[in-house]
Image: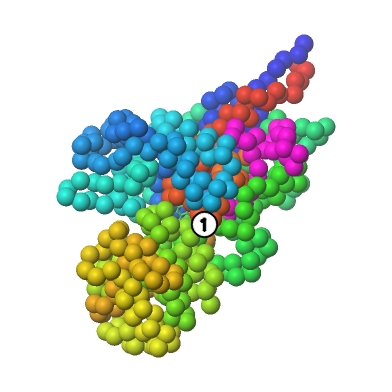
Amino acid sequence: MTKTRRPTIVVAGAGLTGLCAAVSAREAGAHVVLLEKGSREDVGGNAAFSGGLFLFCYDGPDDLTSITEEFEPGMKADRIEAPPYTRQAYAAELMAMSDGQAEPRLVNALAERSLATVRWLAAKGVRFTFNRTLGAEVRDGVLHIPPGQVLTCTGEGMSRGFEVIRPLLAHAERVGVEIRWSTPLADVLRSDGRVTGVAIGDGGQTVPADAVVIATGGFQADRELRREYLGPQWESVRLRGTRLATGDGIQAALRAGADKAGTWSSCHSAAVDPTMPSPGSSEASPPFPLHGFWLGVLINRDGERFVDEGPGPWVKNYSRMGKAIMRQPGCEAFEIFDQRTAARVADEFAGAAVPLVAHTVPELAERIGVPVDRLTHTLETFNNACPPGNDISEDCGTDGITPPKSRWATPLDRPPFVAYPATAGLTFTFGGIRIDPDGRVLGTDGAPVTGLYAAGEAIGGLFYGDYPGGAALMRAAVFGRAAGHTAATETRPTPHLA
Ligand SMILES: Cc1cc2nc3c(=O)[nH]c(=O)nc-3n(C[C@H](O)[C@H](O)[C@H](O)COP(=O)(O)OP(=O)(O)OC[C@H]3O[C@@H](n4cnc5c(N)ncnc54)[C@H](O)[C@@H]3O)c2cc1C
């Protein structure tokens, strides 16, 4: 007699993507084995270090309060100004930030499924609250929030993203996902054109599976791959998140026939405090991001400006600042402010970073070790290009200088001056595996690689030059959930005899 059994889905990686894939595959009735390279303390991957910001579509305040009110009964929607964020706006933003290179069907799937997926996370116990720090501003007693970037998970500080992981892990365990810690995926095993399991550890042991979901993140933590794809200057860069995303799953998928997608030579990289090392574990603090650049200027070791510090809201542009710094001599820079903004920067955007302080520009040049004449000339030229008046306003851009400062341009003329040394902190890589919107891995011929699925930072095709804050956690959840569901529902288990 032939008895059908439930399909076994192996999910590799217990970050946000892997947890979503595992829970979703379980909901669809599969037996799920979740393999994590790190120990239980490493659960969550990059999400455990993240700001917990989710970028998703909504039509109005009701969509938001329906997600948050249970947890924040005191928060009234009429105190929040949050214009609708439509699917079209989401898609347009991703396309614009990728210079039109993002794959439209992935973009559309991300936008279309974003709200439902935030609700799905909330139903699993993830708590959301209104974003009051990442780009949000209180004016006249009203909380104004950049379109889309409305909710973060609850929790404190820049690493509040762990609060997404904690309830999801508890839920996965509750619903019977079998989790194996310290069990790295080494390879995907195939036979007769179908996936049969994975090799683990040093490759000597195997775990049988009817389908495999790759959720092992990007390759940012591998020195060799960084050098090969991002360039030699990235070899010794600081990481902002997990040390375990070394591209293992991406490489295994490529060996199994997956196609590459996206830009492999680019990444998300913020300006960070160079005195803070890469975190060793998810309990350690990541290098503090210096997100105050838009309130001052960025100067390189030659005393020159090199980037538009105010192309738009900082939360939509910080991912390009690290890359801009990496192109400078010595891969270092200084964020410079005067007394107009120094206190705000120290309060909101510098963490424990300690600035160098100087009463004159020549003294500042000496303290930070850049040529006095160059820095003097750069700041004079910048100040002269700023519009008259004392306001720091989004509408104020420089005139006649290259690079411009398109917004928030005000002269730096109120000493003492402060300078924060800055270097690049690598958040995640942009290149990865090609998938379709349902998480199927696609081969070089464009057809699905039967039994192989992938999502999250392991995939390419969505982010290119830049990325809007919140879209990466959303990508992890949307495509992780999709990949787990597709794997469980379209995989026919190999029948065995009973
Ligand atoms: C400091 C910081 C702040 C951020 N803030 C935000 C934010 O506010 N909003 C936003 O949208 N995004 C943010 N991001 C990005 C976001 O956190 C990530 O894009 C997202 O969490 C990626 O999830 P993932 O599961 O795909 O990959 P990862 O988080 O990298 O998880 C991969 C998992 O796979 C495991 N693994 C690796 N190799 C193997 C293997 N061979 N076998 C088994 N397991 C393996 C890893 O240990 C890890 O647990 C931030 C990132 C950082 C670092």
Segment tinted magenta in the rendering: 428-453
The single residue placed furthest to the front in the displayed view is 400
Residue sitting at 58 percent across and 23 percent down? 29
The single residue placed furthest to the top in the displayed view is 1
- Residue 299 lies in what quarter of the image? bottom left
- Residue 223 lies in what quarter of the image? bottom right
Query: Is 46 covered by the magenta stretch?
Result: no
Q: How crowded is mark 1: few (under 14 residues within 10 Å), some or many (20 or more)?
A: many
Label 1: which residue? 268
The picture places residue 453, in percent across and down from the top left corner, at 65, 36
Quadrant that contains the N terminus: top right
Ligand 1 closer than 8 Å to the CB at disc 1? yes
Asked if 278 appears above or below 171 in the picture, the reply is: below
Given residues 472 and 304, the one toward you in this image is 304
The picture places residue 43, in percent across and down from the top left corner, at 51, 47
Given residues 287 and 265, the one toward you in this image is 265
Given residues 377 and 328, the one toward you in this image is 377
The single residue placed furthest to the left in the displayed view is 140
Asked if 136 appears above or below 126 in the picture, the reply is: below
- Residue 88 lies in what quarter of the image? top left
Q: What amino acid type is highlighted by mark number 1?
A: His
Asked if 414 appears above or below 86 in the picture, the reply is: below
